[in-house]
C-alpha cells in the first residue's frame, strides 16, 4: 500500500513547490513517467542544487512520456507518448513543448502520431529539423519534421521492420532506440526483436531514411539489443543487450556507417545467477568509462574503456538505491549520475569518482511516481 500512497503525497507536495518557481540560474531536471492509475501524471520538474533534487511540481500533464529529448538551443522539450491510440487511430504519439525560461514549466506546442504503437525512444537530429522515433510494439521507425518554432509536422518517413527472433520476447520486430553518429549521416536503430542494429542513411534536409550498406549488424541470437552509445571520438559504439545482460563493442567506420563487432562482455559480476535484464548505456564524456543498468541485480555496471582498442574491462557495479533502474543520465558537469528506479518510485543521484569512474554511495533520493527517463537542462549563460 505504501508504494501507491507515496506518488499521491509526492504530487501534492511538488505542486506546492512548483508555485514557488524554479531558479533559472540552476540546472533543471525533467523526469518522464508512465501514467495511469497509481502512477505518474506526466513530466515532473526538479531543480539540481548541489547533490540534491528539489521538486518543482508537474511540468506538463501528458500520457506516458517514457522518453524525453531536449533542444538546448531553442529551449524545447520533446516526448514520446508510449500509448497505442491517438486521435482514434492505432498509433502512439509525439509531443513538442516550449520551456518557460523562468519557471521551467512546459507549454504544449502540438502533437503528431508516431506512426506505430508504443513509441519508446526518440532523438533530435543535429540540424534540429527532424525527430526520429522508435515504436516498440509495432517495430517501426518514423521521422517527424520539426519547424523552427518547435512545431511538429506530419511524419515524412516511416519504415516497418520485419522478422522475428528466437525467444518469447522476439516474436516480432521491436525497435527500441535510435542513435545518430557525430556527422549526422547515419541513424542506427536497435531492434530487440530481431537481434539487429539496423543502419540507415539520413537525409536531414528531406527528412528521409534509406537503408545503408550494410543494412544491419547482427548480434548473437537472444541478445535483445536495447540502447546504443558512441564513444565521444566516434571510433567505437556500444550496445547494451537487454535479454542476455551484455554489452557489445563495435568498431565504427564513419565513412560507410559499418559496425564491426569486436567482443561482448557481461554486465553482471561473476557468480550472479539471478534474473536480470539490461536497460540503459552511456559513455562518460571523457571516453574513459561506460555505464550500463541492470534490472534484477538493480545496479549500474561500470567498465573502463581501453583508449586504443575501445574494449571494455569490468570494474564492478554499484547498487542504484532502488528497484528496476530503467534509465540514467549524466548531469551537465558529468560529475553525477541520476538513476530512475521505476520499480521503487525514486530517482537517486550518484557522484562519479573522477579517478576511477566508480559511483559513490547515494547522496540524494527523490520520490518520483514511476520514473522512466531523466534529462538535464543547464541554465542559459
Image (cartoon, rainbow, N blue to C red):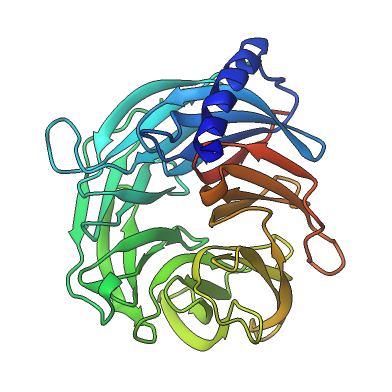
267 to 134, vertically: above or below: below
Residue 58 locus on image (x, y percent): 52, 23
The residue nearer to you, when weighing 276 against 353, is 276
Q: Which residue is found at the position 44% from the left and 80% from the top?
A: 259
Q: Please say whether residue 147 is visible from this viewpoint.
A: no
15 to 5, vertically: above or below: above
140 to 305, vertically: above or below: above
Q: Which residue is found at the position 47% from the left and 42% from the top?
A: 68
Residue 41 locus on image (x, y percent): 43, 28
The residue nearer to you, when weighing 173 against 346, is 346
Q: Is residue 152 left or right of residue 368?
A: left
Q: Quadrant location of the C terminus?
A: top right
The residue nearer to you, when weighing 47 against 9, is 9
Q: Is residue 5 left or right of residue 36?
A: right
Question: Which quadrant of the view contains residue 320?
Answer: bottom right
Residue 301 locus on image (x, y percent): 65, 70
Amino acid at each position: 500500500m505504501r508504494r501507491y500512497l507515496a506518488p499521491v503525497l509526492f504530487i501534492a507536495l511538488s505542486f506546492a513547490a512548483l508555485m514557488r518557481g524554479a531558479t533559472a540560474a540552476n540546472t533543471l531536471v525533467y523526469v518522464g513517467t508512465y501514467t495511469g492509475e497509481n502512477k505518474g501524471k506526466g513530466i515532473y520538474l526538479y531543480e539540481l542544487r548541489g547533490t540534491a533534487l528539489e521538486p518543482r511540481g508537474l511540468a506538463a500533464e501528458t500520457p506516458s512520456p517514457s522518453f524525453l529529448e531536449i533542444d538546448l538551443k531553442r529551449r524545447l522539450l520533446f516526448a514520446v507518448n508510449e500509448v497505442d491510440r491517438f486521435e482514434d487511430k492505432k498509433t502512439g504519439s509525439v509531443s513538442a513543448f516550449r520551456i518557460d525560461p523562468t519557471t521551467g514549466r512546459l507549454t504544449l506546442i502540438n502533437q503528431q502520431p508516431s506512426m506505430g504503437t508504443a513509441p519508446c525512444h526518440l532523438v533530435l537530429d543535429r540540424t534540429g529539423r527532424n525527430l526520429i522515433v522508435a515504436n516498440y510494439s509495432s517495430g517501426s521507425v518514423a521521422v517527424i519534421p520539426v519547424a523552427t518554432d518547435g512545431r511538429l509536422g506530419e511524419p515524412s518517413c516511416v519504415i516497418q521492420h520485419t522478422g522475428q527472433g528466437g525467444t518469447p520476447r522476439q516474436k516480432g520486430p521491436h525497435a527500441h532506440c535510435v542513435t545518430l553518429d557525430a556527422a549526422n549521416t547515419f541513424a542506427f536503430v536497435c531492434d530487440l526483436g530481431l537481434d539487429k542494429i539496423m543502419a540507415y542513411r539520413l537525409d536531414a534536409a528531406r527528412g528521409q531514411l534509406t537503408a545503408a550498406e550494410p543494412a544491419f549488424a547482427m548480434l548473437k541470437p537472444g541478445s535483445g539489443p536495447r540502447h546504443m552509445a558512441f564513444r565521444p571520438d566516434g571510433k567505437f559504439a556500444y550496445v547494451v543487450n537487454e535479454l542476455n545482460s551484455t554489452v557489445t563493442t563495435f568498431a565504427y567506420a564513419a565513412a560507410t556507417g559499418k559496425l564491426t563487432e569486436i567482443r561482448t562482455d557481461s554486465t553482471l559480476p561473476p557468480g550472479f545467477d539471478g534474473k536480470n535484464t539490461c536497460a540503459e548505456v552511456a559513455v562518460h564524456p571523457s571516453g574513459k568509462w561506460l555505464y550500463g543498468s541492470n534490472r534484477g541485480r538493480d545496479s549500474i555496471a561500470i567498465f573502463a574503456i581501453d583508449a586504443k582498442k575501445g574494449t571494455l574491462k569490468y570494474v564492478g557495479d554499484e547498487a542504484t538505491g532502488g528497484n528496476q533502474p530503467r534509465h540514467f543520465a549524466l548531469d551537465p558537469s558529468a560529475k553525477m549520475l541520476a538513476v530512475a528506479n521505476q520499480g521503487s518510485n525514486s530517482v537517486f543521484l550518484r557522484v562519479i569518482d573522477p579517478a576511477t569512474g566508480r559511483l559513490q554511495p547515494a547522496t540524494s533520493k527523490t520520490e518520483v511516481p514511476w520514473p522512466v527517463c531523466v534529462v538535464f537542462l543547464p541554465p542559459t549563460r
